[in-house]
Image (cartoon, helix red, strand yellow):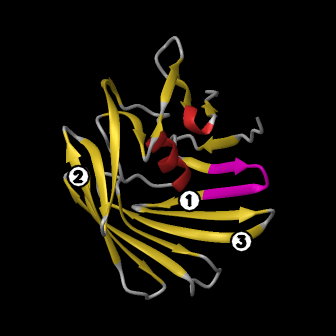
Amino acid sequence: MDSLTNNFTYDKDGKLIQDLYGASITTYSYDGSVTTITNYDTGTFQKRTIVMNNSSGLAINVRTEYDPNGANWANSFYEYNGDEVARVIYTYSGNPSSTSTYLWADHNMIGQVTGTDTTTFEYYTDKPRQDGDYLYLTQVVSGYEVYRCKNLLKGYVGATFTYDFTPDGKIAAFRIPALNTVLSYEYLCN
């Protein structure tokens, strides 16, 4: 099985400042409620994402620019009920927008509806959500948070996740058996 490692670097306040993955480097900078994420592959600009966060730290507007001057872009505007995302409006370089709505039960996102397509999500209701589950990882790599679920994600779109835990209860690995994929975590502290 091939493997690559994401090496995350954090500042003294615990904020992610760099993700190194093979020849790809992503930098994260913060200015008040704005986060700027810039991706490079072998030193070449790939994209810049500018995130406006609300007072709870959830993304309310995400603009991704695919060229250095920002002419080719995508924008996502998020609306919330409390800290549960209710709707997102997507726009791409001025084309007509599309909308997704989210369904929640017991503080877990159970569905995403886009047009006639519905994606459903399942949870381990006996396990609280914690750093290291699939939604957490996708949000860390993206550089912004949208989903704050109560329980540990079990699966969606036909993929089921299983978890291994460290003796102190942290996620050590999560597995996607259908894809023969294992993501392992190693925690280093200074």
Residue 47 in percent (x, y) is at 62, 70
The residue identified by callout 3 is 45
Q: Is residue 71 above or below residue 161?
A: below
The residue identified by callout 2 is 103
The residue identified by callout 1 is 29
Q: What residue type is labelled 1?
A: Ser
Which one is nearer the viewer's eye here, 127 or 119? 119
Residue at 65 percent across and 49 percent down: it is 19
Q: Viewer-nearest of labels 3 and 1?
A: 3
Identify the mark nearer the N-term, 3 or 1.
1
Q: Assign the C terminus to one quadrant of the image.
A: top right
Residue 126 lies in the magenta-colored region: no
Residue at 34 percent across and 55 percent down: it is 58
Q: Viewer-nearest of labels 1 and 2?
A: 2
Q: What residue type is labelled 3?
A: Phe
Q: Is mark 2 on a helix, strand or loop?
A: strand
Q: Magenta part of the protein: which range?
A: 18-27
Q: Are marks 3 and 1 in contact (CB under 8 Å)?
A: no
Separation of marks 2 and 3 at Cα, in angstroms: 36 Å
Separation of marks 1 and 2 at Cα, in angstroms: 32 Å
Q: How crowded is mark 3: few (under 14 residues within 10 Å), some or many (20 or more)?
A: some
Q: Which amino acid does label 2 sit on?
A: Leu
Q: In this view, does 17 lie above or below 190?
A: below
